[in-house]
Amino acid sequence: MAGLPERLRAYLRELPRGALALLATELERAVARGDQFPEGLLEEVRGALRESGQPASRAGDPTRVFFAALEPFLVNDDAAHRRPGRIARAVLSPMWSWICRDLAPAEAKTYNAEATQADPATGEQLARSFRECVVAKMESVLASTKTDERARRRLIGQIGTQNALDDARGLLTILSAADVFAQIEKSLPAQIRNLAEAQLDNVKSLLDQTVGSRSDVLPYALVLTMGRLAAPWQLIRLGVKAAETDDAIRIAGSPYAVAVAIVLSEIEQGISALKADLKRGATAGVPALIKTIHDCARGLRTELDLSGDSPWTRRLSAIRADVSKVLKNQVESASGKVRRLLRLRPLSEVPRNSALDADDVSEAEAAVELVGVCRLYASELAINEMTMRTFTELQHSLETGTQSLLDNLRQAGEGERRFLQSQVDAAVRFCAKVFGPDYAAVLAKAAEVAANTANQRDAERKAVAAKA
């Protein structure tokens, strides 16, 4: 692991747990194929997974191989929160326990024993056979719950998750349609930059042919499709295409209405991730999250006619209000953080040879950068007024404050010079975010001249004192 760059290690630890889990899986498959990649990368990914609280799987693990078909649909959501076309990773453990303990104990024991010792190809074949067994038994058990209330209660208790029946149905749908999903993945382009015109017709035709009348499969097929889209919100166009109109009410009555529901749920999940990142101070992924939320919200408004009072209209309004609330404190606090760091202080408040706290400077810089990001997307996210007000405050603070800092640095004594220099250095970083790198470079050069002037004056004073 010593050969891995520190920036790569830091980047891995900023990735969402789901992305880390998928990356670990792909690297394990590469190991099995004999592919080459940087030494220590797989262990570093596993380490990042352990730190995130998501156990790292190992190639050849019978449970992982059995659940491999679920990977494109797994999310790290709260198991109580259901999203169309998704299944929470947290339900896999109780589902596996139910399968091995109650649904197919004898077959599970045999599968685990044989798959643990098998090579990857044989392990895949064993998993496929066991999945077919599980599907048959699940269909029978779930069918019995429709007419037998005692069987229904017993099954809920055995599985033990909050949405036990829905979790079981979701698992059954994915496992039973594994060949359908494999065909879709094989037939879709690796990336679809613009789902429109002939490309839209082709994708719609593919989904109609492979999914057929299985309405339970369509949400998962759409999630697979969304994974190939350069702009996930374009999934909405399948709903428009199916209904042959952009009228939200008519689209809501078509089978492809779930495409809109999926995009809405993706926005809501993005807001949850944004809240979590801001709360723990992990700002590296925040700009991308805000852009994704903005693009999806704009896509909904431009692709659909939401002029009426429809459930989708109300849901989008609630989303925009939630984003505004999430970003409000972050945006409005930025100018205050900058002012506190750059304000001129009496000598009595500045310990000799001290400097600004590096973490405080980084936090303020991230806040300033967030304001800049929000400026790009302010109108769509209902944060235009507060963002422009804060940005104007930042401009004013930096324009008026940096000259005073330079003047004081030029006149500073040795004891206070280090603190003033740290303030000027912080101002350079903030100005780069607000005014651009050229402005920041000019300010940095002015700070260098001011510091040299102060040093030269000290040297002259010491020379005079030495002669005296």
Image (cartoon, rainbow, N blue to C red):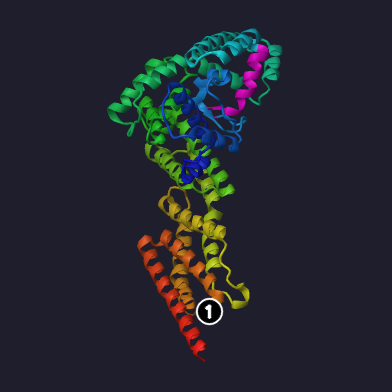
Crowdedness near tag 1: few (<14), some (14–19) or many (≥20) residues, C-alpha within 10 Å:
some
Query: For the view shown, which residue lies furthest in the front direction?
Result: 467
Q: Amino acid at mark 1?
A: Gly
In the depicted structure, whether residue 379 falls above or below residue 87: below
Query: For the view shown, which residue lies furthest in the bottom direction?
Result: 468
Q: Position of residue 388 (x, y in %)?
A: 45, 59
Residue 252 or residue 289, whichever sits in front: 289
Q: Is residue 253 visible?
A: no
Q: Position of residue 7 (x, y in %)?
A: 47, 46
Residue 99 is a magenta residue: yes
Residue 452 is a magenta residue: no
In the depicted structure, whether residue 423 falls above or below residue 150: below
Residue 105 or residue 462, whichever sits in front: 462
Q: Position of residue 42 (x, y in %)?
A: 50, 32
Q: Secondary structure at mark 1?
A: loop
Going by the image, does 110 lie left or right of 32?
right
Going by the image, does 67 lie left or right of 180?
right
Q: Which residue is denoted by mark 1 in the rendering?
A: 413
Quadrant of residue 255 within the rendered picture: top left
Residue 34 or residue 128, whichever sits in front: 34
Q: Position of residue 382 (x, y in %)?
A: 47, 50
Going by the image, does 3 lie left or right of 107?
left
Quadrant of residue 165 within the rendered picture: top right
Is the stretch drawn in magenta largely helix, strand or loop? helix
Q: Is residue 375 visible?
A: yes
**Residue found 45% across the figure and 52% down from its top:** 374
Magenta residues (range): 83-102
In the depicted structure, whether residue 386 falls above or below residue 452: above
Residue 372 or residue 342, whichever sits in front: 342
